[in-house]
Amino acid sequence: MGWDFETEPEYQEKLDWVDRFMRRDVEPLDYVLGDAYDKTDQRALAVVRPLQATVREQGLWAAHLKPEMGGQGYGQVKLALLNELLGRSRWAPTVFGCQAPDSGNAEILAHFGTDEQKAKYLQPLLDGAISSCYSMTEPHAGADPTLFRTTAVRDGDEWVINGEKWFSSNARYASFFLVMAVTNPEVSAYEGMSMFIVPAETPGVTILRNVGTGSESAADGSHGYLRYEDVRVPADHLLGGEGGAFGIAQTRLGGGRIHHAMRTIAQVRKAFDMMCERALSRQVRKSGTGRAPGSAVETVPLASLQLTQEKIADSWIEIEQFRLLVLRTAWLIDKHQDYRKVRKDIAAVKAAMPTVFFDVVQRAMHLHGALGISNEMPFAKMMVNAQVMAIADGPTEVHKITVARQVLKGYRPVEGLWPSGHLPARREAARARYADLLEHLVGNDETGS
Ligand SMILES: Cc1cc2nc3c(=O)[nH]c(=O)nc-3n(C[C@H](O)[C@H](O)[C@H](O)COP(=O)(O)OP(=O)(O)OC[C@H]3O[C@@H](n4cnc5c(N)ncnc54)[C@H](O)[C@@H]3O)c2cc1C
């Protein structure tokens, strides 16, 4: 019997330790440190390095990786339980060595990289010594990579890359970029694109500007608008073979999407906790009561109002549904060990994520009144982050299309005019199935026995 919602006691102990460590040491970092990807920030490093050492001692460093790469090989279900704690803090993934996009980039370097590429780019990434960048989306096309125009042309022992990339996260702090480029325009885009490792200092790489999300200032923006102009990389900087970029991207994005979802659970719970606290704390005048002269106004907490209770109940139900979908998908990934076999489930998680995130944050924000909308609470930022989840790694529509297509593979069109659920045909088939028995029973009934 394979259904079990319990966490192993030994692992639960680890999670309890993480919970305490997060509250005491990690979550406060978000309020005192800058960008987690800036490896030149000595002040941040001085604070974070000892915390990373503690995580290593606990055997929780880079828990998403297999043991041969320095992780624990926990698998996705355990990772989900861990990530739904780490997601509470922007700095936590860096403290635990599992921050996106480095985690996904490490995954594809491990999977497709040569020994030289692993030694030069993967190892320092796993050690947390450098940051990296995934440079795929272009200004004119994101959701549909078949429209990408950036090219890489072979010239002797080098590849020459030309094009522009958009929203390349952390480009300003990255030591290298993974760049997707067209290498053969004569074949389909699925076979004609390749992935390159481009060191950040390569001549011809320009960050045109850094773009922020929501109301982030231009100075804080960390999504690079990049130009690659006659950028030359050695032939051995091709990752995973010519024409292999699509397969590589799928390997990377499948894992990335589910890990985002695991951490999103933490964010949604955070908003939910604030909602419940507010509902119990904020007093309103009790309905139907007035202020009698000389007496205090009779008040009740927001939580006693049924429309508030509905917000809390709806939110709790949606969070639990989403969490179960994430955990089941994690379990399927562990079972199949192949993201392609879990495409539908990952796409479903990706499509569900922004809705539950947005709805719960919106209700929490609303119950906090003006304070909720103000910049003294985190809700506005959370709402933007909910929208990020609907766009980054592909818009919701594209994932819904994947779910629908995969689901429909399990169905066939009906033969004939009427649907298979047509009641007259069902009744007729049922009568035929039980005709003998029913006739016999009726016959017995008629004889009175
Ligand atoms: C915070 C953040 C970080 C990111 N980081 C990176 C990164 O590190 N590297 C990187 O390469 N990219 C990154 N991206 C880019 C991201 O992958 C793209 O934004 C995404 O793929 C969508 O592309 P687009 O923005 O061009 O939107 P478009 O492709 O223009 O889509 C816009 C809208 O059009 C509609 N639409 C598009 N296609 C379809 C369709 N087939 N069916 C129905 N409707 C459709 C949807 O409503 C969609 O929301 C990041 C984005 C964000 C927001």
Image (cartoon, grey):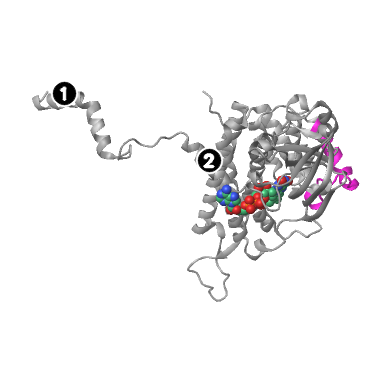
Q: Residue at x 82, y 40 (%)?
A: 198
Q: Mark 1 falls on what kind of element?
A: helix
Q: Main secondary structure of the magenta part?
A: helix
The magenta span reads 30-56
Q: Amino acid at mark 2?
A: Val
* Left or right for 270, reference 161: left
Outermost residue to the left: 447
Q: Position of residue 398 (x, y in %)?
A: 57, 46
Q: Position of residue 415 (x, y in %)?
A: 33, 35
- Looking at the rendering, which quadrant does residue 110 occupy? top right
Q: Residue at x 87, y 43 (%)?
A: 202
Residue carrying label 1: 440
**Disc 2 residue crowd, few under 14, some 14–19, many 20+, Cα 10 Å:** some
**Disc 1 residue crowd, few under 14, some 14–19, many 20+, Cα 10 Å:** few
Q: Amino acid at mark 1?
A: His
Sequence order check: which comes first, mark 1 or mark 2? 2
- Looking at the rendering, which quadrant does residue 104 occupy? top right
Q: Position of residue 310 (x, y in %)?
A: 50, 54
127, 60: nearer the viewer: 127
Circles 1 and 2, Cβ within 8 Å, touching? The answer is no
Residue 270 appears in view = no
Residue carrying label 2: 403
The alpha-carbon separation of the residues under discs 1 and 2 comes to 48 Å
441, 397: nearer the viewer: 397
**Residue 151 magenta-highlighted:** no
Q: Residue at x 75, y 58 (%)?
A: 216
Is the CB of the residue bearing disc 1 within 8 angstroms of ligand 1?
A: no
Task: Determine whether 302 is above or below 407 in the image.
Answer: below
